[in-house]
Amino acid sequence: MNELRIAVVGAGLMGADHVTRITTRIVGASVVAIVEPDAGRAAAAIASAPGSVHFASIEEAIAAGIVDAVLIATPGQFHEPVLLPVLAAGLPVLCEKPLTPSSAAALRVLEAEQKAGKKLLQVGFMRRFDREYMQLRSLIASGDAGELLALRCAHRNPSVPASYTNDMLINDSVVHEIDVVRYLTDSPITAIEVKHQKRNSLSPAGLKEPILVLLETESGILADVEMNVSIQFGYQVRTEAVFERGLAEIGRTSGMTTWTDGVIGTAEHMSFTTRFADAYDTQIQRWVNATLVGEIDGPSAWDGYLVAVACEAGVTALNGGGRVKIEYAPRPAFYS
Ligand code: ISE
């Protein structure tokens, strides 16, 4: 096989972005099928992937026999019903984060993958493909600045739709830090605590944010996350690493700086789709390359399960649970 025929499931913001990416920038792959219940979104996606076909369900797309791999970009609660038939059909799949919103569902997905007998599933934690995150991970592993002591994370969105709920602060947004803190420290998260800050009056009604999240790793690192989803000015994800002998920072706003009318200015991102565009491109290209040779090249279903457990604890903490300890099921040999 030298061209991967992909079905994209879900053609909302992220799905549509992936369809354009695969069609215009990714080598060795094309979008052949769109699975999307909304007629308008489906039509727009089909139009940006010439030759692709619309299917009402993943089962129909699989049955058509034209699909080599699947990319799932629906909201998290719809992942399991798509993943199970895809894994049963033995198809490789890249599933956007979170793998599933519940750890019980994640365990069912792990079982389905083990039944398929081969690692087929990669989870879309795209920050692992961001150049600066990779650099920071290497710096931590090298020990060049001494031992890592703490991580200070800021995750800021200009705004969110009215449909965004309090639990999504953890499951949809902090989910990235939950994965990346383990990726950077190479150590599982063992406890989580969430504090509410003064409410931003610009948040959608009912949303209590920003929040401050504290993550503890087994290796003793403390990571704090300022999670803000209504900060208006732009989209920003920054991380500062505190070492025994110094600091490192990633995620500074970059690009052309202007000095005019007594003001210094650099354009800020307004969305994760541009802030992480390069990371998404790298993630999808590496997934395509690996899939063409029967492998995965990124976070596995096991990584997705660990994050699902920590997110569940995070939602408990958010809802007044205090400091919540996190325990994981033993890792099956399949994922070692
Ligand atoms: C969104 O779903 C993402 O994944 C973004 O990376 C994150 O910054 C945002 O808060 C989420 O809603």
Image (tube, rainbow, N blue to C red):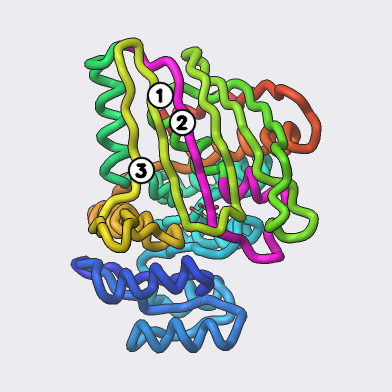
**10 Å crowding of disc 2: few (<14), some (14-19), many (20+):** many
Q: Residue at label 2?
A: 181
Does residue 316 lie above or below 93 as drawn? above
Residue 203 in the figure: left or right of residue 276: right
What's the mark number on residue 185?
Answer: 1
- Residue 272 figure quarter: bottom left
Residue 19: tell me if it is visible.
yes
For the record, the magenta segment spans 147-173
Residue 248 in the figure: left or right of residue 315: left
The amino acid sitting under disc 2 is: Val
Helix, strand or loop at mark 3: loop
Residue 20 position, x and y percent, is 35, 75
What's the mark number on residue 253?
Answer: none
Q: Residue at x 66, y 57 (%)?
A: 77
Helix, strand or loop at mark 1: helix
The amino acid sitting under disc 3 is: Gly
**10 Å crowding of disc 3: few (<14), some (14-19), many (20+):** some
Q: Are the residues at dot 2 and dot 1 in contact (C-beta closer than 8 Å)? A: yes
Residue 185 in the figure: left or right of residue 35: left
Q: Residue at label 3?
A: 251
Q: Nearer the viewer, mark 1 or mark 3?
A: 3
Q: Earlier in the sequence, mark 3 or mark 2?
A: 2
The amino acid sitting under disc 1 is: Thr
Q: Nearer the viewer, mark 3 or mark 2?
A: 3
In magenta stretch: residue 269: no
Nearer to the camera, 265 or 26: 265
Q: Residue at x 68, y 58 (%)?
A: 202
In magenta stretch: residue 169: yes
Quadrant (top left/top right/bottom left/bottom right) for the C terminus: top left
Nearer to the camera, 220 or 91: 220
